[in-house]
Image (tube, grey):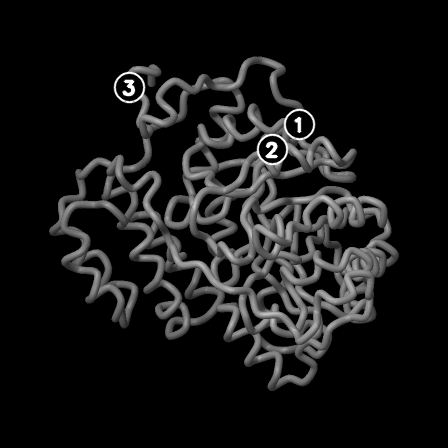
Amino acid sequence: MSPAERICTPLNSDVPPAREGEFRPLNIGRLRLDTPVVLAPMAGVTNYPFRSLCREHGAGLYVSEMITARGFLLGNRLTTKLAAVHPDERPRSIQIYGSDPKDLGQMVQRLVDEGIDHIDINFGCPVPKVTRQGGGSAIPAKPRLLARLVRAMVANAQDVPVTVKMRIGLDPETLTYLDAGRAAQEEGAAAVGLHARTAAQLYSGDADWDAIGNLKQALDVPVLGNGDVFECWDALRMMRETGCDGVIVGRGCLGRPWLFGEFVSVFAGQEPASPPNLGGVLEVMEEHGRRLEDLFGEELGVRQMRKWTSWYLRGFRGAAGVRAQLSRLAAFDEMRPLITPLGLDQPFPLQALRASRAKGSRTQRVKLPEGYLDNRDDDTPPKGPHTADEIRAWEKALGAG
């Protein structure tokens, strides 16, 4: 495909592929990624079926959905399933959620014994149930607490790289990313990923790529940028504008696992192949369904697939007319009869490249414990879910599984 035939939005019509030697491989501890792209951990999304699809289309690092440390240690059934070893998955990467240094250290030790290749810690979750107890995106507001948690993980990780993912702050008045990034680096974090939005923004507005550049200038370890990467060309623009070492891709790849093949092409200096037409998308959907069924069983797998149908079909002509039926999908073999009449030769719609997926445009006032910001030097761990029932409620609120 020539640049004139490129399928992209006007924002990226003049962005050139990478020049030879323009970008270095991304080194995260002992890991080396020739294509410096990471699949963002997303609760209820980046389970093994979707990770495996993305991996087959490209190269990079594919992080699990968030695994609750306490649930893992207690042997919670769903947590254990989501953290399970898959022999064909290398490098194997898991994101942990936890706020107790003892739990984090024990979980890391177990994961290392099982042969994990990369561990990420979630300091960016903006869900009120989490921040109200001082967890997730509230933790970077207390750099000494963040340092204590990272220290506990690194101490048990041996040579497995531990990375941190966080947001730029709680709100525009409480930006935390520079102090938190420095604290993570000092405690041995191998890289820092920055979602360039505040917790108050959730997923609304534009990501602040300038903050990514600021963090890159402040740290010596690799900095990975996250936010508003919907096309392969966005990754090149982000790295050129900010100097960051790699890119984390989240909502932009939902229902588009082939996007990772496009990243491989543009970082290799080539124009990417065209995205699949509706027939090709349907084939990917059916394969995704088979993998969900293999992992979760038919009933839960079908329930999982319902949300994916909307993401895969976003922008295709006539898709809105079958959305309600697909949202009530009862069996995987119902998809093809519903989608085929839309016209399987429909090309991939240009308007779908940057279409909103999964997250709305609302903002929020961040919920914190009473007096949480009165002593920013406090390193006392917040109370998190402890019992099996609390963990199940916690994971349900986060959308895990």
The residue sitting at the left extreme is: 341
Using a 10 Å C-alpha cutoff, classify the residue at mark 3 as few (fewer than 14 neighbours), some (14 to 19) or many (20 or more). few
Q: Find the distance from the CA under tag 1 to the CA under tag 2.
A: 6 Å
Q: Amino acid at mark 2?
A: Pro
- Label number found at residue 5: 3
Residue 41, position as x, y percentages in the image: 56, 54
Vertical arrangement, residue 67 with respect to residue 118, above or below = below
Number of numbered discs present?
3
- How far is disc 3 from disc 1 in space, using C-alphas? 29 Å
Residue receiving disc 2: 36
Q: Is residue 31 left or right of residue 125?
A: right
- In the visual, does 226 lie left or right of 299? right
Horizontal side of 134 relative to 4 (left or right) equals right
Residue shown at the point (30%, 45%) measured from the top left? 281
Task: Examine the rendered structure and indicate whether residue 220 appears above or below residue 19.
Answer: below
In the rendered view, tell whether residue 23 sits above or below residue 352. Answer: above
Can the viewer see residue 401 in this picture? no
Q: Does the residue at mark 3 contact the one at mark 1 (Cβ under 8 Å)?
A: no
Residue marked by disc 1: 25
Identify the mark nearer the N-term, 1 or 2: 1
- Label 1, secondary structure: give it: loop
Residue 287 image point, x, y percent: 37, 53
Horizontal and vertical percent position of residue 365: 51, 64
Residue 255 percent coordinates (x, y): 37, 49
Amino acid at pointer 3: Glu
| Circle 2 crowding by C-alpha within 10 Å: few under 14, some 14–19, many from 20 | many
